[in-house]
Image: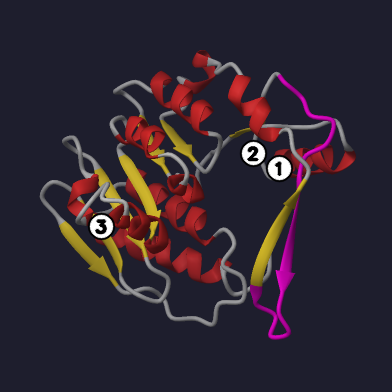
Amino acid sequence: GSESSLLTALSSEDDSINYQNHLVSLGIPVYGLQEQLDQLPRCVIQMGDDGKEIGYDWFGNGVEEVFQTAEVDADLIKKFPLIYLAICEHMFATRVAEEVDDSQILAYNPGSRVFEDHQYFKQIQQRANYIFLNEAEYGHLVAEGFVLTPKDLIVKPNQVAIITAGKRETTLVSQNELIKVKPEIVTAIDETGAGDSFASAFLWARVQGYPFETCMRIGNLLASFVVRQVG
């Protein structure tokens, strides 16, 4: 329902070019890093007899190295009122966050990166307006003593943290609020992309001016559509 663009690593292979063209056909401009790859890694998803995802493996490499050394186009970053940092290489994510100014919104979803290095998470946490975690990621931060309660994720005024928990309640915390919302109960086939779908819908609703609880419900609704099918 709103305009968006993608900044990512690209390669010269047909699959990468075709996917880029597909996104452009949907009205989503794609900005590639200056460094190109000969081939992007492949993710092979393992499915059980019941049709549900049971695991996945990555084949190929090179993306980490590209992101580690990639220059951040500050002028490009400043074009957008909202920057959503999905899971990506730590150093690149930090450099992007440093280019976001106070007139922009920075949303951060570290994904599995939160298990690897708390220092990078902490650096971006200091700058982010919105932080998205799932229950496993939040649980790891608690187990490591990085936080004790969801409130500890809030380190500056006007910051919001959201913790999704699958079939359990979604939790939102800020300096002055604690909101819990029950999810949409559906039969999940493939949970790939559920977190990013929740975050995108939540942020869209927030930009439209909806209150937090409504944003959470809209996020849960979109995520419930995504997990009902593979892909």
Disc 2 secondary structure class: loop
Check disc 1 and give the amino acid type: Leu
Number of other residues with Cα within 10 Å of mark 1, as a class: few under 14, some 14 to 19, many 20 or more: some
Q: Residues within 10 Å of mark 2 (few under 14, many from 20)?
A: some
- What residue is pinned by disc 3? 172
Instruction: Say whether marks 1 and 2 touch (CB < 8 Å).
Output: yes
Q: Which residue is located at x 35 percent, y 27 percent?
A: 104
**In the image, what residue occupies the spot 50% across and 15% down?**
74
Which of labels 3 and 1 is toward the front? 3
Is residue 10 visible from the viewing direction of this image? yes
Q: Nearer the viewer, residue 122 or 86?
A: 122
Between 29 and 167, the one lying in front of the other is 167
Q: Which residue is mark 2?
A: 28
Can residue 32 be seen at all in this image of the molecule?
A: no
Other-residue count near label 3 (Cα within 10 Å), few / some / many at <14 / 14–19 / ≥20: many
Q: Which residues are magenta?
A: 35-53
